[in-house]
Image (tube, grey):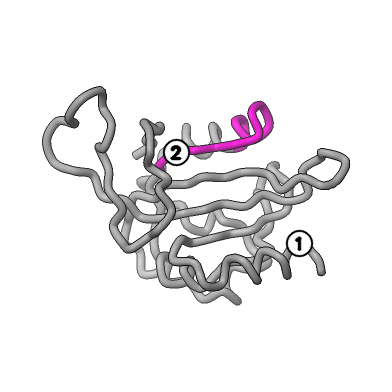
Amino acid sequence: MNIVDLVRMLAEPLDVAVVLTDIDLERPGPTVLYANPAFARLSGYGIAEVVGGSPRLLQGAGTNREATRHLPRMLRAEGRFLGCLQNYRKEGDAYLCELDVRPILGRDGSAQAFIAFEREVVRRRGRPAGAGTKRYRAAGNAVTPMLAGTIPVFA
């Protein structure tokens, strides 16, 4: 069983969008190896449309360019990116997307692929209570509590 088959087996039933890419972070960006059905529902793109392409197809005019430069830098430096940025659905509608990107490591400890967990979030109106936590809530029925703490927002 290869890494794509393993991720497919685990990600198919999830409500959180999952995207698996190769490790090439240079432009034009990593190549999508797999995307689950939740990603297709979130983005409006068919799975066949994204596999073989770059996740950058979700970016548009309102996507923060600093965020697009920060993401690969964080993956290289810390091995993880956790943040929110504005993405675009196939129809052109903008949405705030929370991304949690992590490497999948091989036996030798080197990155073999990147796996991204994505979900749409909506910003709550008004000032956040407390120390800035709970500013966002999941827009859908995602089970994974990815917003446990404060995360950078690039919107």
Left or right: 60 with respect to 48? left
Residue 43: image x %, image y %? 43, 65
Question: Which label belongs to residue 3?
Answer: 1
Identify the image quadrant of the N terminus.
bottom right
Q: Which amino acid type corresponds to the residue marked 2 in the rendered image?
A: Gly
74 part of magenta stretch: yes
Q: Say above or below: 110 vs 15.
A: above
Residue 154: image x %, image y %? 39, 36
Q: Which residue is mark 2?
A: 83
User: CA separation, marks 1 and 2?
Assistant: 25 Å
Dot 2, how many residues are within 10 Å of its Cα: few (below 14), some (14-19), or many (20+)?
Answer: some
Answer with mark 1 or mark 2, whichever residue precedes in sequence: 1
Closer to viewer: mark 1 or mark 2: 1
Residue 19: image x %, image y %? 58, 59
Q: Say above or below: 111 vs 87.
A: above
Q: Which amino acid type corresponds to the residue marked 1 in the rendered image?
A: Ile
Residue segment shown in magenta? 72-84
Identify the image quadrant of the C terminus.
top left
Q: Which quadrant of the structure image shows residue 74? A: top right
Residue beneath the point at 47% across and 32% down: 66
Residue at disc 2, secondary structure: strand
Q: Say above or below: 136 vs 89.
A: above
Residue beneath the point at 56% across and 72% down: 12
